[in-house]
Amino acid sequence: MAGGWTRDGAVQDQIDSTVEDEVRRVRDRLPEGESLRLCAECGEEIPARRRQAIPGVRLCVACQEEQDAREAGRAGYNRRGSKDSQLR
């Protein structure tokens, strides 16, 4: 059931768009190419098993965990579904 100016299924469309955006964002961040031997952040050696498991890896585990923690606050906020974006 839609309400106001929305059509039936609009809520599901917003959910689908949010999921697609997040999947696209994560895929764009996947490393590519040859793995680095030394971490790009701290310079520590990246273990060979990590380099084999994640092709194109650029960070050691500790630096990757720090980066992930910084980005965790950027939870998927659906701008498409906000009233502000609909008024513009």
Image (cartoon, rainbow, N blue to C red):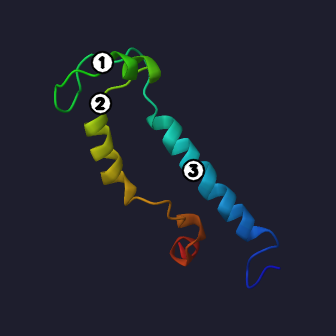
What is the CA distance from the residue labelled 2 to the residue labelled 3?
Answer: 24 Å
In this view, 76 is above or below 50: below
* Quarter location, residue 15: bottom right
Q: Residue 36 carries which label?
A: 1
How far from the left and from the top, in percent, is residue 87? 56, 76
Q: Look at the picture and state if 17 lies above or below 59.
A: below
Identified at 56% across, 78% down, the residue is 83
Please report contact status of discs 2 and 1: CB closer than 8 Å, yes or no.
no
The amino acid at mark 3 is Asp
Closest to the observer, 14 or 55 = 55
Residue type (three-letter) at the residue carrying disc 1: Leu
Instruction: Using the numbered discs, state the Cα–Cα distance from disc 2 to disc 1 in whole angstroms.
Output: 8 Å
Q: Mark 3 points at which residue?
A: 21
* Position of residue 72 measured from the top left corner of the image (x, y, whole percent): 38, 55
Q: Where is residue 73 in the image (x, y as percent from the top left)?
A: 37, 60
Judging depth in this view, the residue of 12 and 3 nearest the camera is 12
Q: Could you tell me which residue is drawn at 42 percent across and 27 percent down?
A: 31
Q: Is residue 74 left or right of residue 41?
A: right
Using residue 29 as the reference point, say whether residue 5 is left or right of it: right
How many C-alpha atoms fall within 10 Å of the one at disc 1: few (<14), some, or many (≥20)? Answer: some
Q: Do the residues labelled 1 and 3 touch (CB within 8 Å)?
A: no
Give the secondary structure at mark 1. loop
Say which quadrant the N terminus sits in: bottom right
- Among the 4 quarters of the image, the one containing residue 18: bottom right
User: Circles 2 and 3: CB distance less than 8 Å?
Assistant: no
Say left or right for 59 vs 10.
left
Residue bearing mark 2:
59
Q: Which of marks 1 and 3 is nearer the N terminus?
A: 3
